[in-house]
Image (spheres, coloured by chain):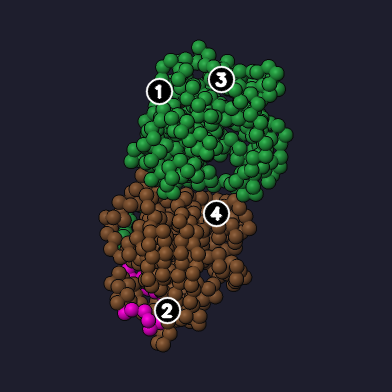
Chain colours: A green, B brown
Amino acid sequence: MSLVVIGTVAFDALETPFGKTDKIVGGAATYIGLSASYSVKPVKVVAVVGDDFPQSDILLLQEHGVDTEGLQIKQGEKSFFWSGKYANDLNSRETLVTELNVLADFDPIIPDSYQDCKYLMLGNLTPQIQRLVIQRLINRPKLIVMDTMNFWMDVALDELKTTIEMVDVLSINDEEARQLSGQHSLVKAAKIIMAMGPKYLIIKKGEHGALLFHKNKVFYAPALPLEEVFDPTGAGDTFAGGFIGYLAATDDISFENMKRAVIHGSAMASFCVEKFGTERLLNLTQDEIEAREQQFADLVAVVPATAVQNV
Amino acid sequence: MSLVVIGTVAFDALETPFGKTDKIVGGAATYIGLSASYSVKPVKVVAVVGDDFPQSDILLLQEHGVDTEGLQIKQGEKSFFWSGKYANDLNSRETLVTELNVLADFDPIIPDSYQDCKYLMLGNLTPQIQRLVIQRLINRPKLIVMDTMNFWMDVALDELKTTIEMVDVLSINDEEARQLSGQHSLVKAAKIIMAMGPKYLIIKKGEHGALLFHKNKVFYAPALPLEEVFDPTGAGDTFAGGFIGYLAATDDISFENMKRAVIHGSAMASFCVEKFGTERLLNLTQDEIEAREQQFADLVAVVPATAVQNV
């Protein structure tokens, strides 16, 4: 049940209607790793940072069960940096700064100790690098989950499609599913995207929940209606980390278990947005997580009528 | 379990990406009445039309169990007419023509035979007329459900609030809930709106389903992901008709039963959008309806893990 995660470990500077941060630790692999660590340890991360990345934050990841042997530290270089500002409704954001830095020539080296990889999570990165990780694993993992974003559809569609063809589960949001398929209907979009290779498709709809598609089956996991969303950064990655962490921990990739994994991932994401950055993911308890999962179950629970009198 | 519905009975001319219609029969009370008729008969309608409204369409309503004693026919006047055009994604629409005609001085007369009203559905109309119907009923109904729209928030907010204060369940869409409450968070919006009077609030989110709020409880009914939405006209009214029809048929206004009523209303609305106007609502079978309700149940069904191994 060895879990390997590739993605960014980076700095973010965030501005939401509720406040702003200086550079804080972020990146897809950070959120995925922390989120998955509540289900399974270790989470073996492949990523790259510069020598500006604080040793204390690497220790923090390690304390949460993140194996950083695959985290390259490039002397004399700077870590990936992204800065963004959210609109008042938090549904859209503007990128203020993107500094690739160490990401510009990232060569994802897989430590030997990662070769037992059974579950592989490809966090958002260039599709070429995501593919390289698959190719560098001697044995194909039991399950490969891939996250990506519209940016790669704009600038590297052919590369993206080549990588998508190699994975089992693709996780994207509704607008990305529409862009990738050219279809507005998500049911039609799902069919087209699954025909590109992935046997499973997750379409994330933010505050409206997530859909899981497989063949002709569909599962709808609603999102918990929240009083306050403080900072949506990392919610999608936290979802993905919870999803694959749950699957790795249970070592069951049936559709029924994937439904439970989607609920678990949704619960983890609902914590993430309650505070800035990774803050809320650092000190969760299993009791809190189980109580939140129960809230998701209660949200859609209907007791069947013992006797429904339709005329 | 007598059900009274007030609303428009009217002509619509529709244009969607899939085609356009000449004047066809529409109006809130038409959709509500037809939808509710699959749960309970008769559905007693209070509405007004001109002498241009075809007798054959009145007969069609009667054949479906709609009592038209409260349908006034104004000689020498024309029926309400609305014409609209939907955007390509069907999520927005433009009003091309609104001719009030008989609606301009509509006086909702309640026939004596309607005074046994136990369930009252106030379809979208001026809030003054909706209120007049409540006042003209000798005994307050067991349950009053009200539908309205953003238009009345723009032009008659005080009147609207006075009427909202008198009802048990308010049914509006997400943007309307945000406008009425001044809050983006639907959880916060729901608290503010329930403090205005209604003990229950339904927030319709179109393709994202519907939320039912009551005190601190919330229920999320997802919408069925549909391959094709042909014409969204009347979906909200069909939902409302299915909702109150189910409650009237079961005569149970507990929160648990309201959840089932929301699912039933959602199922009815999912039929409505499959064809132009009321077409799909004219010949449904109970088997079709039950099968669709089962699809809604299956959509969110999760079998609990017998043994979840979280570390």
State how far apart marks 3 and 4 are (Cα). 55 Å
- Which residue of the protein is positioned furthest toward the bottom in this rendering? B76
Which residues are the magenta region? B39-55
The residues tagged by marks 3 and 1 sit, at their Cα atoms, a distance apart of 24 Å
Label 4: chain letter: B
Q: Residues within 10 Å of mark 2 (few under 14, many from 20)?
A: many
Residue B229: % across, % down: 39, 55
B101 lies left or right of A30 = left
Residue identified by numbered label 1: A142
Amino acid type indicated by mark 3: Asp
Toward the right, the furthest residue is: A22
Residue position marked by numbered label 3 in the rendering: A107
Kindly identify the residue that appears in the image at 31 percent across and 60 percent down. Answer: A310
Q: Mark 1, chain letter?
A: A
Q: Under tag 2, what secondary structure?
A: loop
Q: Which badge, 4 or 2, comes first in the chain's sequence?
A: 2
Q: Quadrant of the image for the C terminus of chain A?
A: bottom left
Q: Are marks 1 and 4 on the same chain?
A: no
At mark 1, the secondary structure is loop
Q: Can see residue A267?
A: no
What amino acid type is highlighted by mark number 2? Ser
Q: CA gap, disc 2 to disc 1?
A: 65 Å
The residue drawn where x is 41% and y is 74% is: B10
Q: Are marks 3 and 2 on the same chain?
A: no
The amino acid type found where label 1 is placed reads Lys
